[in-house]
Amino acid sequence: MSLSLRLDINGEPRIVEIDDPRITLLDLLRERLALTGAKKGCDRGQCGACTVLVDGRRINSCLTLAVSLDGAEITTIEGLAGDGGVGGERLHPVQAAFIRHDGFQCGFCTPGQIMSAVGLLAEGHAGADPERVRELMSGNLCRCGAYRGITEAVLDAIAAEAGAAREDAA
Amino acid sequence: MPLDSPAPIAPYPRHGSNSGQPLTRRDGELKVTGRATYAADNHPADLLYAVTAVSSIARGRVTALDVAAAKAHPGVVEVFTPANRPPLAHDPDVKLGMFGFRIEVLQDDGVRYVNQPIALVVAETLEAAVEGAALLNQQYEAQPARTGLDDGERYAPAAVGVGAPAHTAYGDLDAGFAAADQIVETDITTPAQFHNAMEPHSVVAQWDGDDHLTLDMGNQALVMSRDAYAVYFGIPAQNVLIRSPFLGGGFGSKAILNGPQILAILAARQLKRPVKLALSRAQMYGPVGHRGRTWQRLRLGLDGEGRITALHHQSTAATSSFEDFLEPAASASLHAYASPAILAETQGLRLDTGTPGPMRAPGEASGSAALEVAIDAAADACGMDPLEFRLLNYAETEPGTGRPYSSKALRECYSEGAKRFGWAGRPLQPRQMRDENGMLVGWGMGTALFPCPHFPAEARATLRADGTALVETAGVDMGQGAWTALAQIAAEALGLDPEQVEFRSGVSDLPDAGVAGGSGHTASAGLALHNAGEDAIARLAELAGADPASPLFGAGNIGVVARAGRLHRRDDEGRSESYADILARTGKSMVVGTGRMARDDAAAQAWAMYSNGAVFAEVKVDPDLGVVRVTRLVGAFAAGRIINPRLVRSQYYGGMIWGLSFALHEAAQTDRRTGRIMNADLSEYRVPVNADVPSVEAILVPEEDRYVNPLGIKGVGEIGVTGTVGAIANAVRHATGVRVSRFPIRIEDLL
């Protein structure tokens, strides 16, 4: 059995052949497309380490069957930094804020945290309210306990975005 | 100071400004871009996937496995069971050194605990391996599971933790209690807790022939593990290479070999192809260690003024039916408060569980949780403020031994923490404070304490022709920030900026950096790196000093200072030469220095060495629903010299959040009928989420320690757990009037 999927992954249109309907988006990315940034922490949608954006929305890629995504746009942590990838000034503002605020320790949950934060920014529900940020980031576990830095990083990125929006309006 | 104690170590001369700087993590960019590679991210060509089938009973034996059904599934390559498991060179039922626990690797059909591996399925795809394991349809002959105090087998242990005494007595306990005006008793039970590092235990195993093994795995003890794998597979240690550039958390669970990983390595050898195995989250509740349950009782004798006259800490600690690791909880009472008589004793209890192991602050966490509740109860019984009571019973020298402390800024921790928290004016009686929403508000505190173990460690520092350096040690960064802090230490010793230092670590073929554990890695590996750096500089100075063309000619080793990539004459700093110029003129491409961590044994024996701290907690409790929320946590810690305050704060935050988790969240729930863990996942086994931690602060209290080691570094990784558990429980008592007797605190305890 072989299924052909049209996927846009990090801005690149791809035809992906899969031979097994049981393959999750997470396992497709990690084991077949060499995109190992998204992590498998629980495989049950309980930890958030596998968070990616599908059509701009943050989802648990471990709970999503790849076959259900024909035509979808997928953004992973590898697609977040600007062209050329690693290079301080090209980092996405959320990535830079995570470094500045030490919003991680072991780094395993970090790709999921960052993708979740990027999704949160797009949702626009948090405002500058730390309590709402903490609540809306609570689908992403961090066992090292870097929550304070994570919250500060997300608030920082929200403030930067609001500042940029004000400048655009002016 | 005792008269026969060794002279103090001269304060470490600070040549540069690398140490003490709050640098961001050197691996930060790799981690935020997804380019940091963890074990399961590796994907060598021709890879096979392995999945363990695990037992769903806690005791008995496996009577049937439908191997044919599993093998018939498309993609399944092989199924390993006790019938065809390839041989090992070491008997897994024999201990292999201090950290070499007995493990389960399909040596027979016996089942000793739930989630024990009972077969290994290997397939071309992950999906096929998972399905194959499900098709085995195992059948059992089950025996009743022993799950608690009433059915477990009690025994008198030879040791607790890793080789610590199970029974320690100081002074005359009976006399202490006889002299007491009152005796306060406190009972506390603590549950089984699982490390639950975000990264499940994983390995990618590759064999080159039958005797060369490469392992990609998260590992907290690279060289020690390399040696152990070599024994299991009957090959020379130098033929085993472990690569562990990043660990997705360890917390003690990735220092000890486990069955599933050994099985995956065996499968790779047998099938002559690389094999990847990653445990599922549920499978981590069994073969990879946990914090064992305890049942603790503390008795404190108190005189009329509130001084402790006797302290008796008893603990019953659970272990597995086949191996001993007893949470050394009672030991926490040996070091914290002054008392003329102390007895700490532990009884063992055998249950049908996986073997416990060291988990962040092993013993100190559970023991201090109980002790700090008992101290609060004692303060209460004396009608005293909890801080005042602790200051009255302040240990000026180590209780029991009378040894002086190498340094102890605990008073400063108490006062700075209390000030920042706003402790003054706290009402003595419970249920006195409410917030604007009618929530009960309570304030509690706890003393934080953690010893300073060091491990043997070695390092190499190479000054290169271009004036930069390469430093190497088989260290481990599991999130504590070793890649950054250790590089800072090395850079300072070499008189270079961290950017000029290439730091190689995380691979087992480098000089042994010891275990990343016991909060001792920065001190141990750091000292080795420091000494290696100084050795390299000394060799360079020797070259320059012997060269008539050098401005440093005749300076001798003692006469130079290394700074910013140049050696300067100490007596005339204007005379200097760059490392690159020295090397170029002498025609050398490099100079190599080596160093070891070698703590002066006499100093280690003469001084009591601990990191200290004080944690203050505010909780709000819904008076109708009993829901507890920790609204503020303030910790003040003194841990000697701080290499990188940004990273150290993160360690304290993490530790305090672990304390919060211990106090309110974590517990594995065992079904007493079957011995199964009912919440073996990350949803029902609760760990704090972001919303559970509204406010956490850490104060870095300055402390100079001239004895602990020449760098003055203590440990920071585990101490945050210790004071926090009690502080929260005591705050709950202050809010509600309820003194808890078990952790985690549950809503039903407060209604």
Image (cartoon, coloured by chain):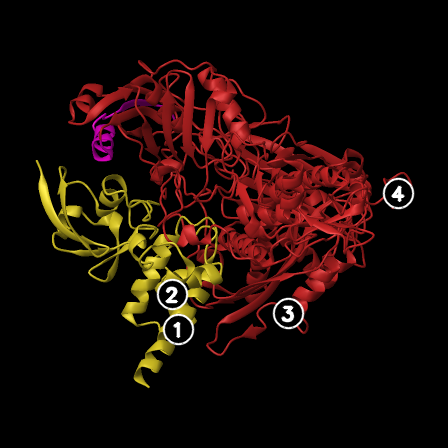
Q: In the rendered picture, chain B carries what hue?
A: red
Could you tell me which chain the residue with mark 2 belongs to?
A
Look at the image and give the residue range highlighted in magenta. Answer: B125-144
Residues under numbered marks 4 and 2 in contact, where contact means CB atoms less than 8 Å apart = no
- Against A66, residue B440 (above or below) is below
Residues under numbered marks 1 and 4 in contact, where contact means CB atoms less than 8 Å apart = no
* A136 sits to left or right of B698: left
Quarter where residue B133 is shown:
top left
Q: Which residue is nearer to you in this view: B15 or B722?
A: B15
Residues under numbered marks 2 and 1 in contact, where contact means CB atoms less than 8 Å apart = yes
- Against B154, residue B527 (above or below) is below
Q: Label 3: how many residues lie within 10 Å, few (<14), some (14-19) or many (20+)?
A: some
Where does the image place residue B140, in percent across and percent down from the top left?
30, 23
Residues under numbered marks 3 and 1 in contact, where contact means CB atoms less than 8 Å apart = no
Q: Which mark is residue B420?
A: 3
- Against A152, residue B567 (above or below) is above
Could you tell me which chain the residue with mark 4 belongs to?
B
Residue identifier under label 2: A93
Secondary structure found at label 1: helix
Residue identifier under label 4: B2
Residue identifier under label 1: A160
User: What is the distance, in whole Å, between disc 1 and disc 4 at their CAs?
Assistant: 58 Å
Could you tell me which chain the residue with mark 3 belongs to?
B
Could you tell me which chain the residue with mark 1 belongs to?
A
- Does any portion of residue B665 appear in the rendered image? yes
Q: In the rendered picture, chain A carries what hue?
A: yellow
Where does the image place residue B713, in percent across and percent down from the top left?
68, 48
